[in-house]
Image: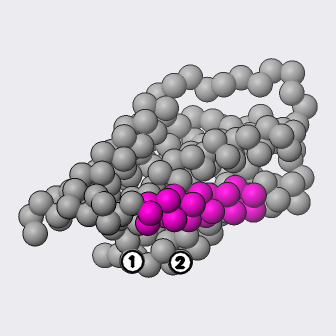
Amino acid sequence: MLMVQTFVIAFSLSADAFAASLAKGARFPGMPLNRSLLIALGFGILEALAPLIGYLLGQQFSGVIEDYDHWVSFLLLGFLGVRMIWKSFSPIEDESGAISPTWGVVAATAIGTSVDATIVGVTLALVSDNIPLTIVTIGIVTFGMTYVGLRIGGAVGQKAGQWAEFAGGIGLAAIGTSILISHLSA
């Protein structure tokens, strides 16, 4: 069950990176292979570091909220899940006139997609006991999904990214609900 939950967390956190990479791939269909690999690597590293930062922050106050940590996890993951679902219905941004994504835009996008992972890292400090596996899995899944998104973005378009973000939101909300139910029924 832990491995399934770890993969769902990794997929859910990678969904917004996948959505962003599909959009970039659709906007810049001739992106060179090495640039796609570097962008995917950057997204993977940032997405893996963000929950580690959140985990370290969460460790600082986990003892204080131990009696209601399941509620904190439920609320944080539920909020992020609903936010991702909401974003999946938002209009797709237009980058008219751009020739290629600049490294600054790529970095800002990667950091923006990693904010959710920082919050999830706080909840991992409350409920998880295998942080290295979770962080490595998140990094690898994000790398893979970003790379695939960049490469197939031109073929499938941005709409697929919105569906991936929707599915990721459902996954995070489901994990938060599962944590709450398991603690309340114990």
Question: Where the N terminus falls, by quadrant?
Answer: bottom left
Q: Quadrant of residue 79?
A: top left
Question: Where the C terminus falls, by quadrant?
Answer: bottom left
Q: Quadrant of residue 35?
A: bottom right
Q: Secondary structure at mark 1?
A: loop
Identify the mark at residue 174; answer none if there is no mark. none
Residue 139: image x %, image y %?
62, 66
Relative to 118, residue 186 above or below: below
Q: Secondary structure at mark 2?
A: helix
Question: How would you rate the neighbour count of disc 1 (Cα within 10 Å): few for under 14, some for 14-19, many for 20 or more?
Answer: few
Judging depth in this view, the residue of 101 and 114 nearest the camera is 114
Question: Does the magenta run of residues contain 167?
Answer: no
Locate residue 102 relative to residue 130 in the image: left or right. Answer: right
Kindly identify the residue that appears in the image at 43 percent across and 31 percent down: 86
Amino acid type assigned to the residue bearing label 2 in the image: Pro
Locate residue 163 relative to residue 97 in the image: left or right. Answer: left
Q: Which residue is mark 1?
A: 129
Relative to 97, residue 18 above or below: below
Instruction: State the predominant SS element of the stretch in magenta.
Output: helix
Judging depth in this view, the residue of 172 and 91 nearest the camera is 172
Kindly identify the residue that appears in the image at 36 percent across and 47 percent down: 76
Residue 30: image x %, image y %?
87, 44
Residue 61: image x %, image y %?
39, 60
Amino acid type assigned to the residue bearing label 1 in the image: Asp
Question: Does the magenta run of residues contain 42?
Answer: yes
Marks counted in the figure total 2
Q: Quadrant of residue 146?
A: bottom right
The answer to whether any part of residue 116 appears in the image is: yes
Question: How would you rate the neighbour count of disc 2 (Cα within 10 Å): few for under 14, some for 14-19, many for 20 or more?
Answer: few
Q: How is the image coloured?
A: one colour
Identify the mark at residue 132; answer none if there is no mark. 2
Magenta-tinted stretch: 40-60
